[in-house]
Image (tube, helix red, strand yellow):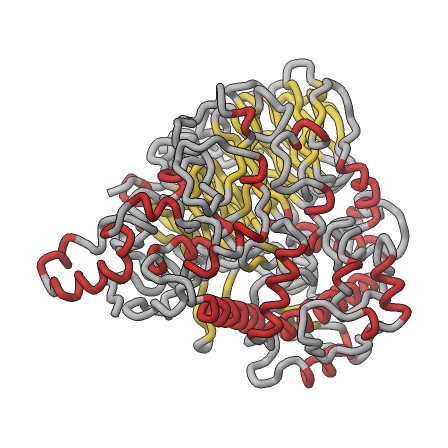
Amino acid sequence: MSGRTAIEKNGTMTGSSEFQLAQPPEDGISSVQFSPSSSQFLLVSSWDTSVRLYDVSGNSQRLKYTHSAPVLDCAFSDSTHSWSGGLDNQLKTHDLNTDQGSVVGSHEAPVRCVEFCPEVNVLVTGSWDMSVRLWDPRTPCNAGTFTQPDKVYTLSVAGDRLIVGTAGRRVLVWDLRNMGYVQQRRESSLKYQTRCIRAFPNKQGFVLSSIEGRVAVEYLDPSLEVQKKKYAFKCHRLKENGIEQVYPVNAISFHGLHNTFATGGSDGFVNIWDPFNKKRLCQFHRYPTSVASLSFSVCGSLLAIAASYMQEQGDISHASDNVFIRQVTDAETKPK
Amino acid sequence: IFQNVFAFVGHEEVPGSHLEWNAGGQADVGTGKNAGTSIREAEERRETTEGASSRAAEEVHNRLIFTAGFGNRVWVNPSQRGGSGFNQSSHAPSPNWSRSGGSASREIRSQDFSFSSQNRFSALETHNGYDRNSSSGFDRNSSSGFDRNSSSGFDRNSSSGFDRNADSSQEETAKHVDAIQNDMEAWQTSGQWPFSCYSVLNGQISGFVELSPEELRLEYYGGRASGDTQAYVSSVQQLLNQWRSRVQELQSINSFSYSSLVSELSKAGSAAAPLGFGSSGFGYVTPGFGATGSGSSDFGSATPGFGTTASSSSAGFGGTGLASSSFSFASSPSNPAQTGFGGLSQPSSGFGNPPPSASSFSFALSEVKPNPGGFGSSSFSFKANAGDQGSGFGSNVTTGFGASPANITAADSGGVFSARTELNDEELKEFSAKRFTLGRIPLRPPPADLLMV
């Protein structure tokens, strides 16, 4: 497996199934994304203003480009094109073969999320300017601006639908083929700020996490019988001195085949959940600092874990920011 | 009474551990292994939690079980009914809001989406919303896993309330008051992120500033780049003080002030009243709303309608015009995204592992990372020590900081909002203004009539 080759090369071994990426970014990691077609390539965006492409099998950094400010999210539109946006308010694209890039457009405030919708072939950005913008990756150019009720904190694509999570616990579902009006307006089932939303690969619903150590599993079908199935559970909490400490759940990533999902929190743990049987499948060792982002490879055999201090406690000394690549097994990710 | 087999505790790796969750209305009361033993127990359980299944399903559907919880409120654009991907069958595609016990095949009318007080709060009389007391059998100490103890809104959909009838409105109130108090207590001691909205019933409680960790970090980087972290530190400190006083105010909520909270929420007529959403029409009222202001499908158009206020967000991330307690970090109107980021290459404050500097703060009670400068170098903690509800703590930390709160006492005026007469001129001026002035943000809640911007 690719992981083992990497260990023999220049990776730092942290266990037989896991290694650290060489040449990680020099500041906080905001997002990790595996390529849609290959487990070999990983895109990493960072507060050091860079977006880097790594060859995971060889554990080497293949290329790097920068924005003029920290980058908050990145995505592949296909195996050779990356998209990224951040505090410079700009959306950039980069051709990973030719190492050429350009600014495609901008928002009025920082770009918080960048996602690609393969079904509709459109790139989506969400921003603190309370809008979602669509972009045509071919030209590339702007394909519309759509106001949201509040700052966009997270978004996810389910087939041809877009799920947007904003401040104020709002959740909106849009039809990317028809953006004339919102398809659904909802509120999060959770009481506190929405941290992350990810859609199920089977497009039946989504998982939503909050800053309060809790995750909700929700369904898109608004019919009563289906809505009854939704539920929420506590996670990423630790007892310290008899008092429960509550951590934000920052990251969610779905295993493409099994429809199980991993969550990562500021407690430094990664858990893998089976939403259908409502079980926790696995928990890995504790990472040195907060887990900021997670990405399963498309084949489902690797999980990229960005352990990156998120400044929840201001400026303190903390473990360095790193990306861990972990081999995952069926036992850890498959429903029983 | 309610005993549940809950095998999962703590954080050890328990591959395949079976966790139970009885979602509302479902028939499986327990695992297979319970079925044989203790049938009586199972029957008791079934009665309390499965009351619904033993009654007519019709009755269940006709009750407003889903209006009490914000979790199941899904507004579906009626124009989607025809050709969307959902199976929008004869069964009403959205929860049945009407109390008339209407049949499932009723046409959806716009008032069904109005979330008017008539529909929403009548639900409180019939349903046991919060089920915090059903903790028996659950390990309250487990800090993860699927459990009934969650105080998420979803619990309101639990079936345990079905067998209750009216006249539990007092109980309802007591339960909600209890829930709010517990939430506030937990919020102060758990190190939980303080800059979050908080929602109870169907509305968001005012007085909370919402910032994501990235937004806060942006402010910090801006301050660091411009060389002035002190302004950042003071701003955060002020936000924390506001948060703390709001939390403590809610913690001392009693049945009376709770009722006025509820009536304020219902008066505003929309779920997110305290945030002014109702006024923008962005709520649940007009099915056709989506066509009016929410988006533009013109290719190339770049101006968000609602978001034109976004340009002001360049001066801060206070959630412009939304929360009554919006807050702007910026002391100057420059765009923070551009403030000094070119200077990110500055060597010393560096990347990756900056030395602990002046602006560390800790959510956690225990390990505040050792800061040799002590309080003088502006470390501050989000947690109130147990038994020290903010007074001594507050005085320690505010020493040396600029803005000291004018009046932190959680004056319970019997309601959530202050009467106009209670506020001084400066506070009234701040509330009347479009945006707060940094350093002059009132710590007391606004009068209800100044909520809408």
Residue extending farthest left: B36
Residue B50 in the image: x percent, y percent?
Answer: 26, 55
Is residue A245 or residue B84 the one in the foreground?
B84
Q: Quadrant of residue B3?
A: bottom left
Q: Please indicate whether residue B437 sits to the left or right of residue B219 in the image.
A: right
Is residue B184 or residue B364 the one in the foreground?
B184
Q: Please indicate whether residue B88 sits to the left or right of residue A133 in the image.
A: left
Residue located 50% across and 44% down the image: B73
The answer to whether residue B342 is seen in the rendering is no
Q: Please indicate whether residue A240 sits to the left or right of residue A29 in the image.
A: left
Is residue B39 or residue A233 the one in the foreground?
B39
Q: Is residue B348 above or below residue B93?
A: below
Q: Is residue B67 above or below residue B401?
A: above
Residue B227 in the image: x percent, y percent?
Answer: 85, 58
Residue located 56% across and 56% down the image: A192
Residue located 61% across and 32% down the image: B287
Residue B60 in the image: x percent, y percent?
Answer: 34, 48
Residue B33 in the image: x percent, y percent?
Answer: 13, 56
Residue located 86% across and 65% down the image: B428
